[in-house]
Image (spheres, rainbow, N blue to C red):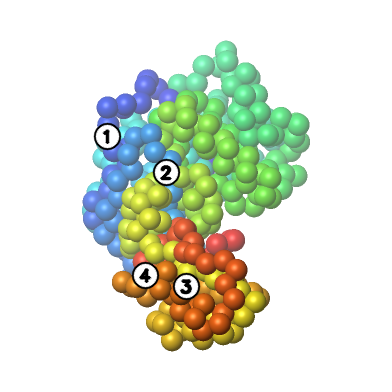
Amino acid sequence: MSVSTGMSGGTDAGVGAVIETRGLTKRYRGGQLAVDRLDLTVSTGSVFGFLGPNGSGKTTTIRMLMGLIEPTAGSATLLGRPMPRAARTVLPQVGALIEGPALYGYLTGRDNLVRYDSADPAADPRTRRARVAQALDRVGLTAAAGKKAKAYSLGMKQRLGLASALLQPRGLLVLDEPTNGLDPQGMREIRTLVRELAADGTTVFLSSHLLDEIEQVCSHVAVMAQGRLITQGTVAELAAGTRGRLAVTTPDPGEAAGVLTELGVADVVVEGDRVTGEPPVGRDTADLNAALVRAGVRVRAFGVERASLEDAFVALTGEGFDVAG
């Protein structure tokens, strides 16, 4: 669905945390625990990535934040106001795209946006057409504005839903899997748009199951798994707190793998002439290189690669991750 209400007055610029939850919990009928005691803090001006595999509780959390469903326990504030109690005051300052856009298939893309804007009591009808045209241009749909929405591809519908959230200035933009259904070029365009919005002062809260998407566009990240918050912080801090993998390029990969395993290197993987593994704690990597040379292994390249967000996720959860979607 798409939540896109107009902005009445300015945003609460003095609020340090745009989103804050304490002990936020959602248990569905039948006992399923979707979100378990979530403590989350999203600072003003950040591009905050909400990261986790499908089914980890991301969308349920967003629906509670937007006042669409009631939490079982705990609290949530948006722009410093309690949700869902202050929804009427807060939501006019928030643009959101949740679980895909709700569109009228028999209307054109342009007329869908006109209808959204007309439902906004704060929207000035005198500037409606110009704002609709600008929103369509920002998401690359100007050429398809006259086409009926039922003929749109999934990616085009996703763009149109995002355009509906951009009809008015927003203090906070909440996006649930915004690149879902987009081709690589469309994904790049949406990432660029998110960066532009952030540069204009909009706080962006972006949920995704794509690690590379979060790593490329976000300044901060929270990692969810099975309804629980694993960690949160800056993207750089999260990756920096994880040890990178040792990587050796050699024409003798079998021999290199054997030597490294004997020296305590874990999870040794051989791919062609490249051998990687987890270096042992407390051991100087220069000693590993020297041991390879002494064993007669011809080393063409040797080093420890920079840890990625994927490495951090695996280290934190012990689980793999769907990087490509």
- Residue corresponding to mark 1: 16
- Residue corresponding to mark 3: 289
State which quarter of the image contains the C terminus.
bottom right
Label 1 crowd bin: few (<14), some (14–19), many (20+), radius 10 Å: some
Q: Nearer the viewer, residue 250 or 213?
A: 250
- Residue corresponding to mark 2: 219
Q: Which of marks 1 and 3 is nearer the N terminus?
A: 1
- Residue corresponding to mark 4: 284
Secondary element at tag 1: loop
In this rendering, the answer to whether 251 lies above or below 19 is below
Q: How far apart are marks 4 and 3 (CA)?
A: 9 Å
Camera-near label (1 vs 3) is 3
Whether residue 111 appears in this view of the structure is: no
**Answer yes or no: do the residues labelled 1 and 3 have beta carbons within 8 Å?**
no
Q: Which of 12 and 152 is in front in this view?
A: 12
Q: Distance between the residues labelled 2 and 1?
A: 16 Å
**Answer yes or no: do the residues labelled 4 and 2 have beta carbons within 8 Å?**
no
State the residue at coordinates (54%, 27%). 167
Camera-near label (4 vs 2) is 4
In this rendering, the answer to whether 238 lies above or below 103 is below
Q: Report x, y in % for residue 68.
A: 40, 47
Q: Which of marks 1 and 4 is nearer the N terminus?
A: 1
Q: Which of marks 4 and 2 is nearer the N terminus?
A: 2
Mark 3 is on which residue type?
Answer: Asn
Camera-near label (3 vs 2) is 3
Secondary element at tag 3: helix
Q: Earlier in the sequence, mark 3 or mark 2?
A: 2
**Answer yes or no: do the residues labelled 2 and 1 have beta carbons within 8 Å?**
no
Query: Is 151 placed left or right of 48 in the picture?
Result: right
Label 4 crowd bin: few (<14), some (14–19), many (20+), radius 10 Å: few
Query: Is 59 placed left or right of 179 in the picture?
Result: left
